[in-house]
Amino acid sequence: MTRVHLVTEDRTGGGLAAVLCAEAEHQRKLCGKARLQFSAKPSTVNGNAELLKQCEKYELFRFNYSPRCDHVFYVIDARNAWDLPQLKVQAPSPPYEQSLPAFIHTICGRLAEIARGSRTEQQWAAISSGFHAHVLVWERESLILPVADRLGLGNAVMEVYTARRAAESVGDLFRGLGKRRKYDKAIDGPEYLQRIADDVQLRAIVLESNPSLRTIVDELVSL
């Protein structure tokens, strides 16, 4: 069985990983492919800077930690990635459909360089097949916005690429419910994302609205 480990920038406690695992397994079943064996506990790090440090541990995930992993997926948030000097990217500008592909390509290349470290080209070629870098546009809440209506939050936002401050947008919807507290990424985020993970129809809407998310799922299905 193919073992996969997910490393995500996820202050919501694994919500993104739940969605990715559920949809990948659903699509693999439709294709007649065997189930993947995901790590029991995905690595959810607090901030993009911490995720870069995890890239340096790629070889450890593959060959040193128990159980060993055949593939390691790193998913970094597009939001504020330009603030990290190691990535050497500028903030993308509208129209995002045109500027994001190059932005994402550059970041994925930089993540691979960090994972490679000082290894020679030959040494990296021997182990790089299990390294998978992805950029999520823009953050966890980008998965919530297109199904906000079905989650009881209010009007859905289908053009998620234009909602660069997705967390604030979800927070605004949350306040509209008349609750006495603000939206909390660590409390409310996991609840909403788990509801998406558990519902195939919600996942379909989310994937249709976010090409960057679909790219991750497609690669998981292709393994």
Image (cartoon, rainbow, N blue to C red):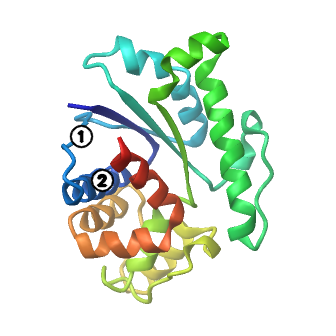
In the image, residue 147 lies at what x, y percent?
38, 79
Q: Which residue is denoted by mark 1 in the rendering?
A: 36
Q: Is 176 or 221 nearer to us in this picture?
A: 221
SS under mark 2:
helix
SS under mark 1:
loop
Tell me which label, 2 or 1, sits earlier in the chain.
2
In the image, residue 160 lies at what x, y percent?
55, 74
Mark 2: few, some, or many residues within 10 Å (few <14, many ≥20)? many
- The residue positioned farthest toward the bottom in the image shown: 155
Who's the residue at 64% across and 75% down the image? 162
Q: Which residue is denoted by mark 2 in the rendering?
A: 24
In the image, residue 21 lies at what x, y percent?
29, 50
Who's the residue at 45% across and 43% down the image? 8
CA–CA distance in space, label 2 to label 1: 9 Å
Rendered position, 27 above or below 181: above
- Say which amino acid is labelled 2: Ala
Who's the residue at 24% across and 56% down the image? 31
Q: Quadrant of the C terminus?
A: top left
> Would residue 78 appear left or right of 209 to someone viewing this image?
right
Who's the residue at 51% across and 15% down the image? 126
- The residue positioned farthest toward the front in the image shown: 32
